[in-house]
Image (cartoon, helix red, strand yellow):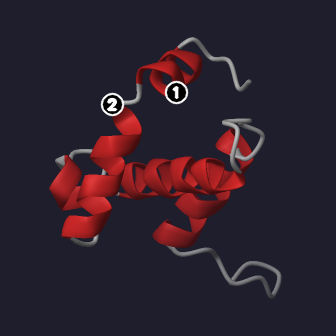
Amino acid sequence: MLYGVRPLSGAMCMDKWAAEEFGGAELGDGRLTNRLIKIASDFADKPTASIPGACSGWAETQAVTAFSIRPARRSRISDGKTS
């Protein structure tokens, strides 16, 4: 411990990074922004994993796939635009 502060675990660190990086994304629904943060955190925690490998189950794998194939959302994110 450094100066009485416990270091963050890998997952907590990725959650914080993802929230800071994508928390301002305006995707039309707060649930979509939360999903983006979760996806980014999961993939940052396991950067070499496949989609099923980074997800915690089949439902989450389907949700990530559905999120990623929506054309309007995909283009806004890949263009670096958050609205």
Res. 71 image quadrant = top left
The local secondary structure at tag 1 comes to helix
Closer to us: 18 or 32? 32
Residue 66 left/right relative to 76:
left
Residue drawn at x 74%, y 35% is 26
Please determine whether, in this image, residue 42 is positioned above or below residue 23.
Answer: below
> Mark number for residue 73?
1
Could you tell me which quadrant the N terminus lies in?
A: bottom right
User: How many tags in the picture?
Assistant: 2
Closer to us: 39 or 1? 39
Please determine whether, in this image, residue 75 is positioned above or below residue 26.
Answer: above
Mark 1 surroundings within 10 Å by alpha-carbon count, few (fewer than 14), some (14 through 19), many (20 or more): some
Please determine whether, in this image, residue 20 is positioned above or below residue 58.
Answer: above
Closer to us: 32 or 79? 32
Residue drawn at x 37%, y 50% is 43
Residue drawn at x 61%, y 74% is 8
Viewer can see residue 55: no
Q: Which residue is mark 2?
A: 69
The residues bearing labels 1 and 2 have C-alpha atoms spaced at a distance of 8 Å
The local secondary structure at tag 2 comes to loop
Could you tell me which quadrant the C terminus lies in?
A: top right
Residue drawn at x 25%, y 55% is 62
Three-letter amino acid code of the residue under disc 1: Arg
Viewer can see residue 4: yes
Whole-percent x and y of residue 49?
Answer: 20, 50
